[in-house]
Image: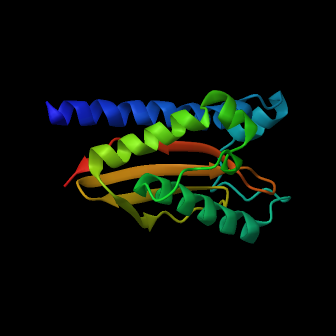
Amino acid sequence: MSFTKTRHALCLSALLATAGFMTGAQAQTDAPAADNAKAAAPAAAPAVPANVDAQAADAALRKRLQAVVTAIEGKSKLASSNFNEEFLKQSPIDNVQKALDSIRTGVGSCQAVARMESPTPLATSVLLNCTKGFVPMELAVEPKAPYRISGILLRPAFWK
């Protein structure tokens, strides 16, 4: 019974947090037809957009990631200033905070233990090591300063 409640809480958390992540994905799919033709062509690896300061974006991504992990820990609340307006339209800050609280309730306290190397400094995948399991998380930021969070995706936990 406890497993089912925890699983449902994690699924709900993922759905709430995904709304903001999907907003960013939808914005990218609204590109002109010429951009779609370029995207359809096979590419070796996505390149960093020319107008993105890679070091500043990566530093901001790390800062935003730390803020999310701290909020999952329950040490602080996430400020709405960490998120862009489009994300907050889809997922109000209260819903995001509830989702992060449910993660802590379900799997205990967490720490980021692994971060996937990415050719773009605007998004990353992270593995959170929690008391009762591991939680994969994806985080994306805007391509321009102040590099606010444009998407979070929390995947279901892998139990220890």
Residue 69: image x %, image y %? 47, 58
Q: Give the answer, above or below, for where 32 lies relative to 138.
A: above
> Residue at image x 76%, y 34%?
37
Q: Which quadrant is home to the N terminus?
A: top left
Residue 56 position by quadrant: bottom right
Q: Which one is in front, 17 or 50?
A: 17
Residue 5: image x %, image y %? 24, 31
Q: Which one is in front, 89 or 123?
A: 89
In the image, is 29 to the left or to the right of 111?
Answer: right
Q: Give the answer, above or below, for where 123 lies relative to 96.
A: below
Q: Residue furthest left?
A: 1
Q: How many marks?
A: 0
In the image, is 152 to the left or to the right of 60?
Answer: left
Q: Which quadrant is home to the C terminus?
A: bottom left
State whether residue 155 appears in this view: no
> Residue at image x 76%, y 40%?
38
Residue 99: image x %, image y %? 45, 38
State whether residue 140 appears in this view: yes
Residue 86 position by quadrant: top right
What's the colour scheme? Answer: rainbow
Residue 2: image x %, image y %? 16, 35
Residue 130 position by quadrant: bottom left
> Residue at image x 39%, y 64%?
111
In the image, is 11 to the left or to the right of 43?
Answer: left
